[in-house]
Each structure stands twice: as structure tokens, then as C-alpha cells.
Amino acid sequence: MHHRHSSSTARLIARCSLLAASEPSLSALVPADAEEALTAMLRADGGIGWFGFAVRHAGTRALLRRIEGAILPGIIAHFLARKRWIERAVLSALDEGCRQVVVIGAGLDTLAWRLHRARPGVTFWELDHPASQLPKADALRRLTHSDNLALVPLDLRTALPSAALVKDPRFQPSRRTCFVAEGLFMYLPESRVLAVLADATQFEGARVVFTFMELDATGKAAFRGGSPLIEKWLQARSEPFVWAIPRGQLADFVAPLGLLVRSVAGADELRTEILGPAGLTNSALAAGECVAMLSRNS
């Protein structure tokens, strides 16, 4: 990771979201208020360059979609569907009484920024590596007009979420809190995944919404049916997938922490719950990553 830029994966997903916003076949999955923030963040994070031209023209968008089909069909729809599922889970937690939301490793995601405007009675934190947060903070400064969103630097390799949160007087350990870790745990060793989950759920009434990779047929953490170029690309950018777990083993994995699996969604559920209502039931959808919600077993 460059000292002043977000990860390659974060930039890729932001670009995929902007591409989808311009595509009639996928635009229904992109929140209407996300485009402005995504554009501003990419500009602050090294610029948009050729991509800005590409998304404005149908021919170049079609070329990018063909490249997607050759490398991993349906990965853009997957990124967007998992984001919609996560947002729905967070809104459910807020409706049930959570008044604090902590997004760990937010990258260039817009969830906290969008919801902090819609839910002024909720306080939002983004905890992320300083390299990711610097350009994001620059981009969102002029778009943020409330004090219920805080971007706090945190290097998960050396510190846990609570270490940053307890230093903020706005954080109240006794209030119900929803933690979000999207596209994060696959880059951490298992011991660190457990440490982050245990740290986040030490607070009463805490929930955790996160994504996790499953193992493919060869026993690797990988999307199914993807090109070998994906692994090489991740390795070249020092962002290899490290941790994965079979979906059926998740409940036993988190049980020693006193956690309960409330819901899990893989490709089938995302197609039914997210793509279906958007009229995209027959769209290609990558498989191999799941989304889950945990709560304390109390």
C-alpha cells in the first residue's frame, strides 16, 4: 500500500461501483447518493484518469464488462449485492436500537458517510489505515456537514478497534453498537480475525456484519471460477487472500467467543434477496464470498 493511497482493491471496488452506476443493467444496485462521494474519493486518491473517460462512453463500458466476464463473471454484481445486504443489516440493527456504527477497514466505501446524513441521532466511526483515510478525509471534508461521523486512523496489524474508540469521548461502551467489516477478514490471519471479533463484541448488545471467503475446490481462499490472474494481481499488490472458512463451520468458529450467527448470505441468498427485488435475478453473480451477521449469545 502506498503511504498516501488506499489499497488497490479499495480503488477497484470504487471504480466498479461507478461503472455500475452508468450501466442500466446494474445501476439499480448503486445508491443514488453514492456517486458524488465515490468520484470525489477517487479524485483525491490519485485521480480518475482514463477511467473517468471510460465510464462516460457506452463502448468503453462494454469493453470493461467484457474484461470482467473474462476474469471473473459477475464480480461487479457481487460487490454491489454484498454492499446492499450489509446496508440492510445495519439498518435493521439501527431499527432494533443500535445507536453507534463502527466500520472497520472502510476503504473507499460510502456506507457510513451516506447513513450519517440520514440518521443524525446515530454516531458513525470509520477505523482504517492512515494511508486509506488521508485521501478519503480530503474528499469528504467538503461533503460532510455533521459531527456524527468520525474518521479515525487505525492499523489493525498493531491495534484493535476498542483502542481507538475508547479515546473518543463520543463513544459510549454501554450503547448498542453495530460493527461492519466488509472485504477485510480475508486479508488477516485467523488469529487476528478472532481477536477483532472478540474485541468488537466485548460491548453489550454488539453486532458484527462482515464478509468472509469460503474455500474453493483446491482448498484456497478464492472466488469460484475466477482466472488465475486474480491471485497473481493480489500477490503483486501485496494483498493476497489469507483466511477463509467453510460456511457450515462459521457457527462453531465463533461460538467460543460467545457469538451467535444470526444470518448468512452466499450467492444464492444474494440473488434472491438483493438481485431479485432489483429485477436482476438472471444476472451473472460471482460466488465464493459470504456475508454474515453475528450477535452476542445472551
Image (cartoon, helix red, strand yellow):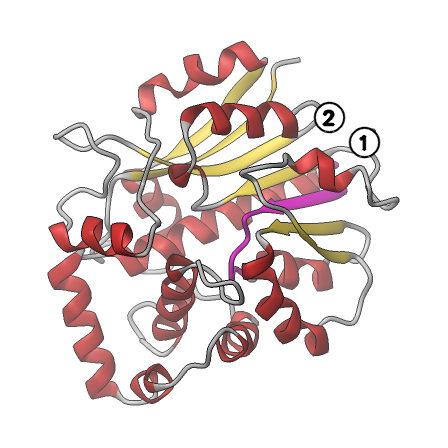
The magenta-colored residue range is 97-109
Rendering coords of residue 247 (x, y %): 33, 25
Between residue 232 and residue 73, name the one nearer to us. Answer: 232
* Quadrant occupied by the C terminus: top right
Question: As displayed, is residue 47 above or below residue 99?
Answer: below
Rendering coords of residue 86 (x, y %): 50, 46
Question: As displayed, is residue 14 above or below residue 194?
Answer: below
| Res 98 seen here | no
Q: Element at badge 1? A: loop
* Quadrant occupied by the N terminus: bottom left
The residue indicated by pointer 2 is 203
Whether the residues at callouts 1 and 2 have beta carbons within 8 Å, the answer is yes
Q: Quadrant of residue 21?
A: bottom left
Rendering coords of residue 47 (x, y %): 46, 81
* Residue 268 in the figure: left or right of residue 298: left
* Residue 292 in the figure: left or right of residue 171: left
Amino acid of disc 1: Pro
Between residue 242 and residue 23, name the one nearer to us. Answer: 242
Q: Is residue 284 magenta?
A: no
Which residue lies at the image location 61% right of the left edge and 47% below the top edge?
103
Q: Is residue 100 magenta?
A: yes
Which residue lies at the image location 12% right of the left edge and 30% below the top edge?
218
| Number of on-image labels | 2
